[in-house]
Image (cartoon, rainbow, N blue to C red):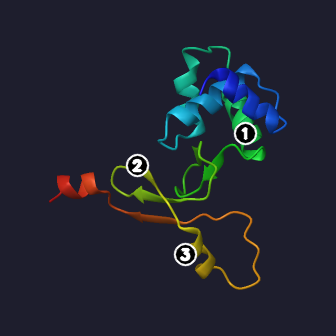
Amino acid sequence: MTTNDHAKRLQERGLRPTPQRLAVYEYLLSHRTHPTADTIYEAVLAQYPSFSRTTIYNSVKALMDAGLVRVVTIDPLEQHFDGNPADHGHCRCERCGQLLDFEMPEDLLAALVPEGFSVQQQDIFFTGVCKACQASFA
């Protein structure tokens, strides 16, 4: 997708496609690493030296409010952001800190939710040790 496509997507969600919002959104779409706001800031700073940390936080919040980005709160010390707003789960490696996505079949999710409960957002995550870390300590 191009910057024009991303700008259209923001407009469809009622957001003005400012350079700040586009830079943050494009970074999240191209870096599926669940970065923190500080990571995003450091990454876009070279291209956009006038951006502040506050600009990044405000852009992320606007994208979240529009349903284009979701917050991942698996790490108790900081928020991570995901450019994939669709429902899915996360695993966090306790050794290297990497966050990994996994799909959650809708029928499985439905079986977990009490009858009559209306889910607004689901956050399912596991913590443990990733395959790479397991291999390095074997």
Q: Residue at x 68, y 27 (%)?
A: 5
Residue farthest to the bottom, as pictured: 115
* Left or right: 54, with 30 as reference point: right
Image-quadrant location for residue 110: bottom right
The mark closer to the camera, 3 or 2, is 3
Instruction: Read off the residue under disc 1.
Output: 63
Q: Are marks 3 and 1 in contact (CB under 8 Å)?
A: no
Instruction: Read off the residue under disc 3.
Output: 108
Image-quadrant location for residue 8: top right
What distance separates the C-alpha of mark 3 from that of mark 1? 28 Å
Q: Residue at x 56, y 35 (%)?
A: 29
Q: Amino acid at mark 1?
A: Leu
Name which of mark 2 and mark 1 comes first in the sequence: 1
What distance separates the C-alpha of mark 2 from that of mark 1? 23 Å
Q: Amino acid at mark 2?
A: Gln
Q: Residue at x 64, y 25 (%)?
A: 23
Q: Is disc 1 placed on a helix, strand or loop?
A: helix
Q: Considering the image in quadrants, where does the N terminus appear? A: top right
The mark closer to the camera, 2 or 1, is 1
Q: Is disc 2 placed on a helix, strand or loop?
A: loop
Picture layout, residue 102 above or below residue 34: below
Instruction: Please state the horizontal and vertical placement of residue 111, each as a whole percent of the image.
Output: 59, 81
What distance separates the C-alpha of mark 3 from that of mark 2? 25 Å
The one of 39 and 27 positioned closer to us in this rendering = 27
Instruction: Read off the residue under disc 2.
Output: 98
Q: Are marks 3 and 2 in contact (CB under 8 Å)?
A: no
Residue farthest to the right, as pictured: 14
Name which of mark 3 and mark 2 comes first in the sequence: 2
The mark closer to the camera, 3 or 1, is 3
Instruction: Please state the horizontal and vertical placement of residue 101, each as a whole percent of the image.
Output: 47, 54
